[in-house]
């Protein structure tokens, strides 16, 4: 299919459809409760390992396979293969019975690989189609990933909000008698079909195309100018490692909360006096509505904000706010509306990372190579996907053994300090072309972005 340069918004529509399906990994918390009960009886750390393996596989496959493959073959084919792989993973999990290893293989390994193949393709294509609005457009595309969590969680659990007094709006697939295996099978079919449809319009613009009336920026405090860094040269710069560490710290915090918010909320609210049933519903609403909804909004709004104030300042501000929220999460989350507020703000800030970091990678290292360069920055997300959920799961198990809910403080405090360090890194960062690194300047090729 050929996309007219006047219809570049079709690429946005396809990107959003693909990302809505890929965001299903953030609905994992909807399954942690059923997997802890009969007939599965998985521990908290076992459940988080499936989530962590999915996130790590996502990042590794994106860096080692998808980035280079889509650069050679284009985004359409790689996205289609990713959708089929993701669908196959959920189908395998749906037919695995109570086998822990079957579910780990299906959702963790194959599911993560499918997401890793498809995720970078819409971003790489859209940065080329919208070099004039990188922050906003990448935020709009990956907002589908955040909103996808809202859709898939609510489809699974049902639209049950607030304490039990407000329950019963719609029971969801669980409430209609669907088993975990049936839901995974349905998801497998839907993901393969919808991602396949979205892939049809994911194509790159003609070589050398630029939006009418737009001129690529020269080197400034936010851009490296027309320079395009290949991955090996990018990795030799302190700017790359600054992006890597800041994204690592932010993803550790965000993924920790995604992986454990329902269990933390239930523990914390029960300790504060709510019944276990009420606490579970409030915690589910905090994740399934407030975190997921504001995660999607944060991707759009932080991207828009960064186009105005600059990527470096926006990331620094976002990381600082996230650090403060994580440090106070244990105490703010002690009430129903406190948990909603904290979940919304943490989700809002966390979502912004996925809009700002691809755009920052393009700003610093070139638009033309963002499809191959950003996956290496994104490896930090895979590492954070191991550290964050496992640290949260460990604190849950420690608290269960000791009977002390305050064990959660340690996990949140560590993540909060990480985010504050990331804010300092970003606020001190300068583009490669504005610092004294002659060895990088000599080796880096000077090219105009495609």
Image (cartoon, rainbow, N blue to C red):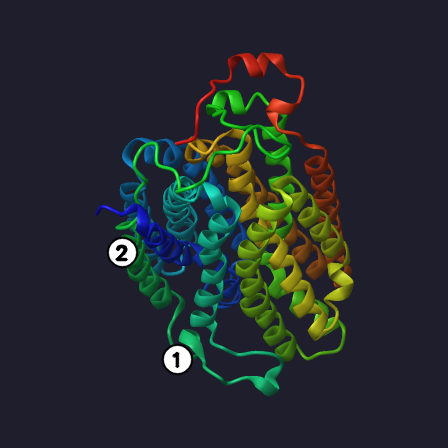
Residue 96: x and y in percent read 35, 57
- SS at mark 2 in the image: helix
Residue farthest to the bottom, as pictured? 165
Q: Earlier in the sequence, mark 2 or mark 1?
A: 1
Residue positioned most to the front: 213
Residue drawn at (57%, 20%) of the image:
236
- Residue 348 x, y percent position in the rendering: 61, 58
Left or right of 138, for residue 261: right
Q: How crowded is mark 1: few (under 14 residues within 10 Å), some or many (20 or more)?
A: few
Residue shown at 75% from the left, 78% from the top: 273
As rendered, which of 351 and 259 lies closer to the eye? Answer: 351
Q: Residue at x 50, y 65 (%)?
A: 30
Residue beneath label 2, please? 197
426 left or right, relative to 370: right
Q: To which residue does mark 1 refer?
A: 176
Q: Give the quarter of the image for residue 23.
A: bottom left
Which residue is painted at 74% across and 38% down in the image? Answer: 424
Instruction: Count all numbered tags in the image, as a single digit.
Output: 2
What percent of the width, then of the height, locates residue 263? 62, 64
Residue 154, compared with residue 408, is above or below; it is below
- In-front residue for pair 132/415: 132
Query: Between residues 150 and 31, which one lies in front from this camera angle?
Result: 150
Q: Which mark is residue 191?
A: none
């Amino acid at each position: 299919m050929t996309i007219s340069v006047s219809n570049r918004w079709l690429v946005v529509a396809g990107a959003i459809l693909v990302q809505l399906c890929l965001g299903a990994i953030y609905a994992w918390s909807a399954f942690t409760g059923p997997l802890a009960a009969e007939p599965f009886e998985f521990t908290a750390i076992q459940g988080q390992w499936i989530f962590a393996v999915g996130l790590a596989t996502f990042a590794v496959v994106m860096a080692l396979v998808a980035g280079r493959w889509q650069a050679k073959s284009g985004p359409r084919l790689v996205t289609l293969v990713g959708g089929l792989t993701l669908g196959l993973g959920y189908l395998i999990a749906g037919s695995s019975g109570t086998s822990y290893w079957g579910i780990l293989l299906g959702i963790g390994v194959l599911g993560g690989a499918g997401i890793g193949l498809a995720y970078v393709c819409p971003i790489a294509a859209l940065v080329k189609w919208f070099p004039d609005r990188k922050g906003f457009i990448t935020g709009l595309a990956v907002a589908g990933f955040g909103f996808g969590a809202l859709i898939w969680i609510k489809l699974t659990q049902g639209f049950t909000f607030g304490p039990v007094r407000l329950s019963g709006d719609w029971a969801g697939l669980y409430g209609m008698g669907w088993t975990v295996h049936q839901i995974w099978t349905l998801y497998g079919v839907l993901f393969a079909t919808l991602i396949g449809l979205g892939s049809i319009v994911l194509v790159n613009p003609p070589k050398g195309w630029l939006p009418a009336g737009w001129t690529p920026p020269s080197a400034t405090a936010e851009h490296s100018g027309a320079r395009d860094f290949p991955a090996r040269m990018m990795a030799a710069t302190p700017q790359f490692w600054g992006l890597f560490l800041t994204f690592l710290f932010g993803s550790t915090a965000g993924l920790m909360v995604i992986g454990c918010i329902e269990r933390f909320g239930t523990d914390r609210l029960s300790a504060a006096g709510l019944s276990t049933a009420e606490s579970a519903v409030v915690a589910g609403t905090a994740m399934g509505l407030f975190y997921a909804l504001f995660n999607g909004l944060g991707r759009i709004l932080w991207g828009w904000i960064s186009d105005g104030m600059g990527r470096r300042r926006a990331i620094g501000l976002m990381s600082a706010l996230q650090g403060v929220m994580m440090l106070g999460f244990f105490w703010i989350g002690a009430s129903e509306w406190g948990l909603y507020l904290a979940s919304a703000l943490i989700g809002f800030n966390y979502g912004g990372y996925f809009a700002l970091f691809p755009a920052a990678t393009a700003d610093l290292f070139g638009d033309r190579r963002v499809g191959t360069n950003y996956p290496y920055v994104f490896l930090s997300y895979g590492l954070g996907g191991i550290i964050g959920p496992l640290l949260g799961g460990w604190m849950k198990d420690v608290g269960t053994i000791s009977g002390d809910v305050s064990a959660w403080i340690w996990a949140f405090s560590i993540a909060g300090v990480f985010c504050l360090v990331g804010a300092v890194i970003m606020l001190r960062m300068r583009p490669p072309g504005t610092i004294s690194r002659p060895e990088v300047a000599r080796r880096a090729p000077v090219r105009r972005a495609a």
